[in-house]
Amino acid sequence: MSYTHSVHVILFDLDGTVLTFDGPAPGPGRMAIDRAMLRLHGLASASSGVRFAGGTDPAIARAVLRRAGKSEDDETIAALLDAYLVELDLVLAERRYRPVGDVHATVAACNARGAVVGIGTGNVRLGAERKLRSAGLLGAFDLARGGYGSDGEQRDAILRAAVTRCAAAPSSVVVVGDTEHDVSAARAIGARVIGVATTGTARLELAAAGADKIVDACGPALVAAIFDATG
């Protein structure tokens, strides 16, 4: 199927897709959640063993609380996420995110072809804003055209929220992400999916999950994959 005349909305995941961090693990997000757990519950390295890649902030918070033997009720999760945002500001003052490839040019090229560019991320909206600003990418995206961890714990619910805000039909949507969870969520709403793989492991995961195409980073290859007339 040709993408050229059917792509109306492109939803970008954030972590690992349009932004990443340099240096050793843990990254800024994990550092912030660990600091929040230390402040609220007196527990160090509470996120150890919890996978963040492809997760949503509410699901990650729930998993961290579960491993710590703490309540997983909505109030406790909300308190942890509020503390996480405070700690994220502090972490980002020490350690910044950076773009994955040429994000600004990629978004500009998609806009030039008449597509609506939005966001589909597991980050709560305020976390997404902080991360994009840190990477110098806040101006590239309209946050009103997005779905966030604030909209739900499951990624398909997040994408549905983004689709609604972009006033699109799911069949006209292309999701761009870096994990199998982006692929499964895209399939759940009937969207196509392009994988961004910055590592060999990510490429294997995306291929196994059935991503339509896989590229190394944002840039001309990603634009071509999105609008590839050969489908």
Image: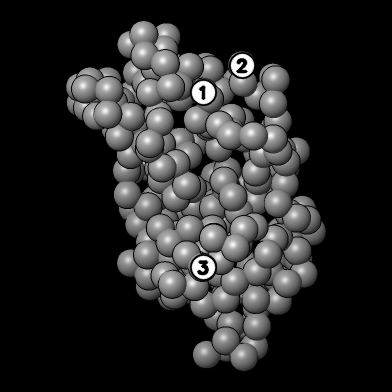
Residue at 70 percent of width and 30 percent of height: 96
Disc 2 vs disc 3: which is toward the camera?
3
Separation of marks 2 and 3 at Cα, in angstroms = 34 Å
Q: Which residue is mark 2?
A: 90
- What SS does tag 2 mark? helix
- What SS does tag 3 mark? helix
Q: Which residue is mark 1?
A: 32
Q: Are marks 1 and 2 in contact (CB under 8 Å)?
A: yes
Residue at 38 percent of width and 61 percent of height: 185
Nearer to me, 46 or 76 = 46
- Residue 230 in picture, x, y percent from top left: 62, 91
In the image, taking residue 99 as reference, residue 31 lies left or right, namely left
Nearer to me, 67 or 127 = 67
Type of the residue with mark 1: Ala
- Residue 58 in picture, x, y percent from top left: 35, 35
Q: Which residue is mark 3?
A: 204
- What SS does tag 1 mark? helix
Type of the residue with mark 2: Leu
Separation of marks 3 and 1 at Cα, in angstroms = 29 Å
Q: Which one is earlier in the sequence, the residue at label 2 or at label 3? A: 2
Nearer to me, 24 or 157 = 24
- Residue 204 in picture, x, y percent from top left: 51, 68
